[in-house]
Image (cartoon, helix red, strand yellow):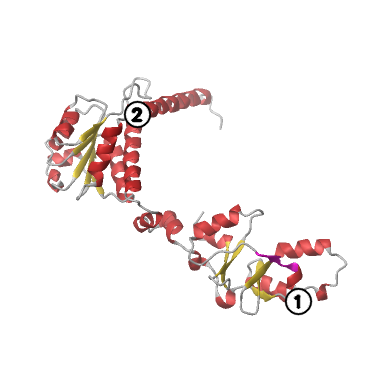
Amino acid sequence: MHSKNSESYLKSAKRTFAVETLALQQTIDSLDELDFAKACDILLSCKGRVIVSGMGKSGHIARKTASTLTSTGTPAIFLHPSEAAHGDIGLVSSDDVMIILSKSGESDELTSLLNSIVPIIAITSSSTSRLANAAKKSNGVVLYPIIKEEACPHDLAPTSSTTAQLVIGDALAIALLEARNFTSEDFAKLHPGGALGRKLTMHVRDLMVSGDNIPRIKKDSSLNSIMQEISGKRFGAACVIGESGELLGIVTDGDLRRFFQSHEQLDTRKVTAAELMAASPKTTTADILAFDALHLMEDTNPKVMQLPVVDGAGIVIGMIHLHDIVKAGIN
């Protein structure tokens, strides 16, 4: 349904995007190289956990930052400032590091965190705030996102400032990820469930058919045998193999249609797989990720729907279909 206010809504949205985009550019311009490097070094050398804290909207960003750090190889937890004031500050050990987010750096709820026994990395827009001073005293560092304007037309609701905090948190996490040489395999160990886990952990061998379920024919197989194998195994194709099981080519149902459209007068009783097959087809191996096999199928021109799976000697050991990969939730 068309809204009479749609134009004004879009105008407001574009202004918000513009203001927050400018805030990110200001954050990049104001980020001190040495301070950011020091923050990364402090986090990289942390022997305990990274304690991330913030109040209000900054607290929500702090939670997300802790989650991102943890999922990329830097153990972190969120500590609510109010809970810290009521005993939870006791979970901070001398091996830990704290990241505290606050635009003003003056929130009263942060008081219990400022006499820290560990280095504080402060993310605040005020270089003279209590938070900034506490970070300096703790042998930590202050990262200053200089935000000139919130997206809120009254310059009140935290919008641009929290976007800047979010991006600084992400930047720290990714810099540490790269410094640790954190691989996709490491990432997969921390994300075993859901679509992401399947994408990073499921291999071709987990989805391919093998043994008698592989649609296979010999190069001298008749048209009738070819069609029975393609129809019976429901793959829309059959591998053409040699005497030792090596892959010679592939025949798809599309190959059949195209062949007969161009050979209408041919005696089909004499047609063999050797005449129909496409030699040197795209193949995969059992140990690559199913996600990579999917992209191999999609990037082939024209796109293919199935891949023979071969071993190091070129022997056919399986076959995988695009639909089975998608059905497994990998895309």
Give the left or right position of residue 179, taking residue 130 as reference.
Answer: right
Q: Position of residue 219 (x, y in %)?
A: 71, 75
Q: Is residue 205 above or below residue 167?
A: below
Q: Nearer the viewer, residue 187 or 313?
A: 313
Residue 41 versus residue 159: which sits nearer the camera? Answer: 41
**Mark 2 lies on residue:** 27
Q: Secondary structure at mark 1?
A: loop
Quarter that holds the N terminus:
top right
Residue 222 disc label: 1
- Depth check, front residue: 29 or 88: 29
Q: Quadrant of residue 84?
A: top left
Expressed as whole percent of the image width and height from the top left, the position of residue 202 reads: 45, 62
How far apart marks 1 and 2 lie (CA) works out to 69 Å
Q: Position of residue 61 (x, y in %)?
A: 30, 38
Question: Mark 2 Cα within 10 Å, few/some/many (few <14, many 20+)?
Answer: many
> Left or right: 156 with respect to 296?
left
Say if residue 146 shows up in the picture: yes
Q: Amino acid at mark 2?
A: Thr
Amino acid under label 1? Ser
Q: Which residues are magenta?
A: 276-280
Residue 297, disc: none
Residue 328 at x, y = what percent? 50, 60
Precedes in sequence: disc 1 or disc 2? 2
Determine the image quadrant of residue 297.
bottom right
Which residue sits furthest top?
Answer: 154
User: Badge 1 local density, few (<14 within 10 Å), some, or many (20+)?
Assistant: some
Residue 77 vs 28, above or below: the answer is below
**Observer-nearest residue: 304 or 153?**
304
Q: What's the residue at 19%, 29% (across, down)?
A: 132
Q: Is residue 107 visible?
A: no
Question: How many numbered discs?
Answer: 2
Q: Quadrant of residue 42?
A: top left
